[in-house]
Amino acid sequence: LLAPLIEAGVNLRTSDVPVAFPTETVYGLGADATRSTAVRGIYAAKGRPSDNPLIVHVCDLNMLRRYLEPASTTTPEQQEEEKEETIPAIYLPLIERFWPGPLTILLPNPQPSQLAAEVTAGLATFGCRMPASALARTLIQLAGAPLAAPSANASTRPSPTAAAHVRDDLAGRIELILDGGPCAIGVESTVVDGLCNPPAVLRPGGVSIDALRACPGWHRVEKAYKDHAEMGAGNGNADSGKGTATAAAAQTAPRAPGMKYKHYSPKARVVLYEAAAGGPGAGAAVPSAEDLERALRRPDEAGERQRTIAVIRTRHWPVAAGLPIGAALQQTNGSGDEDREGTVLAVSEGTLLGSGADNTEVLARLLDVDLGGDVRGVAHGLFAALRELDRREADVIFVEGVSDGEDIAAAVMNRLRKAASDIR
Ligand code: TXA
Ligand code: MG
């Protein structure tokens, strides 16, 4: 791993082509945050709108403190004489508790800033985190500068949680992917703004809101993001199509600019079943006969190809969400492609039959993924499952939601609501 790490460090110092690297949340697409041409390379590779600011990744607190200072002619020696803490006090308990780790904090961007203007998209603040991944921190050290890095997916696709996912999206657009195996957490960092009062969560992520609330100064932290379901856009909006911002969404200006975009979407149509209110024990409804009938309906362009219906289940759904299946499902282990090791979840495959005891009519191919009942496990496997079902050409994916309250479930449900065309 040392040779690619050193090569990546050299690329980050000298080239304008970004480098993909692992973090504990998702893979990032990194560039030297102080060089405009390098940062522009990120937007170019991703096809990302440049009004969406990037998170700045640091390897230690001294690096962060350096970028809280305005660009100036002051020598490092002169700066070191100042002993006063420049990191806003509100963040110190969070840093103590969650860094390195999946938490991004907003900081005042000094004027003039040492960061490239392209990093902040014109905002007065910059988002910063210190990743828990030792590989990521070593890379930042080798680059000798903080790394601006969004998730390393093509814009709108689910975030990559393994090197193969990055390759699927960005092959030919970048030159180097550091492979650190699958990401431990699997959803992005929590983004918080402690510069406002009360402090706010701009994006739910790998640190739960309850964990934040337990920190001094953060007990009143507010949720400043809105999920589709809460904007009244979820139920029955299927035909308005995925990718279209709803009127309700447009009226609510999101404070983390990235939250306004369509995100995390596989090619398949995602139908999300919300867990009933009533805590972790409450289950989600299973797909109805009408849901299934609609899923089986073949759009004209699909021709004679057999429909593929997929199920992602979490805590309560039985195999295939209880839909009528033929013989027991077969566990299939991906393509046997070594490149995809660590990315392929256990997917079971079978056939969907017409309803009625003796009905043997094959209605569709059926794929089943079990992410398990543990919210951390669901977060870990979620993006990989959406991507794997795409690779297997699912037309529709029925997903069993988890209830929001528990640990990082809010992050899981936020991503799922964004991926879904239908919420039930
Ligand atoms: O876990 C993560 O955060 C990953 C890994 C690679 O570190 N990165 C990531 O970056 O998810 P990205 O670019 O996909 O998402 C960054 C989010 C966006 O919603 C963006 O709008 C918000 O953070 N953000 C960044 N800087 C901001 C700022 N100054 N003010 C408000 N929101 C900001
Ligand atoms: Mg992203």
Image (tube, rainbow, N blue to C red):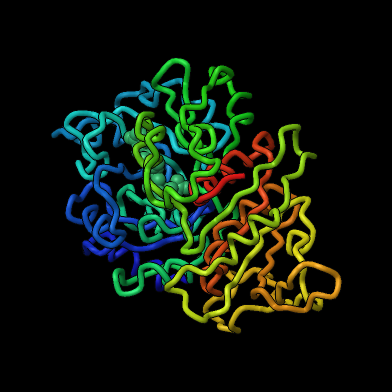
In the image, what residue occupies the spot 63% across and 57% down?
Answer: 398
Q: Is residue 303 left or right of residue 124?
A: right
Q: Position of residue 125 (x, y in %)?
A: 30, 31
Q: Is residue 24 left or right of residue 15?
A: right
In the image, what residue occupies the spot 42% across and 48% down?
Answer: 240
Q: Position of residue 243 (x, y in %)?
A: 39, 51
> Can you tell which quarter of the image residue 78 is in?
top left
> Can you tell which quarter of the image residue 113 is in?
top left
Relative depth, front residue between 350 and 340: 350
**Image height of 388 relative to 381, above or below:** below
Q: Position of residue 84 (x, y in %)?
A: 36, 21
Is residue 64 visible in this depiction of the protein? Answer: no
In the image, what residue occupies the spot 72% across and 38% down?
Answer: 276
- Which quarter holds ligand 1? top left
Is residue 248 visible in this depiction of the protein? Answer: yes
Q: Is residue 306 left or right of residue 65?
A: right
**Image height of 125 relative to 199, above or below:** below
In the image, what residue occupies the spot 54% across and 53% down?
Answer: 24
Q: Position of residue 267 (x, y in %)?
A: 46, 64
Relative depth, front residue between 373 and 21: 373
**The C terminus, quarter of image:** top right
Relative depth, front residue between 77 and 397: 397
Residue at the right extreme, as displayed: 357
Q: Is residue 280 left or right of residue 49?
A: right
Relative depth, front residue between 340 and 329: 329
**Image height of 397 relative to 361, above or below:** above
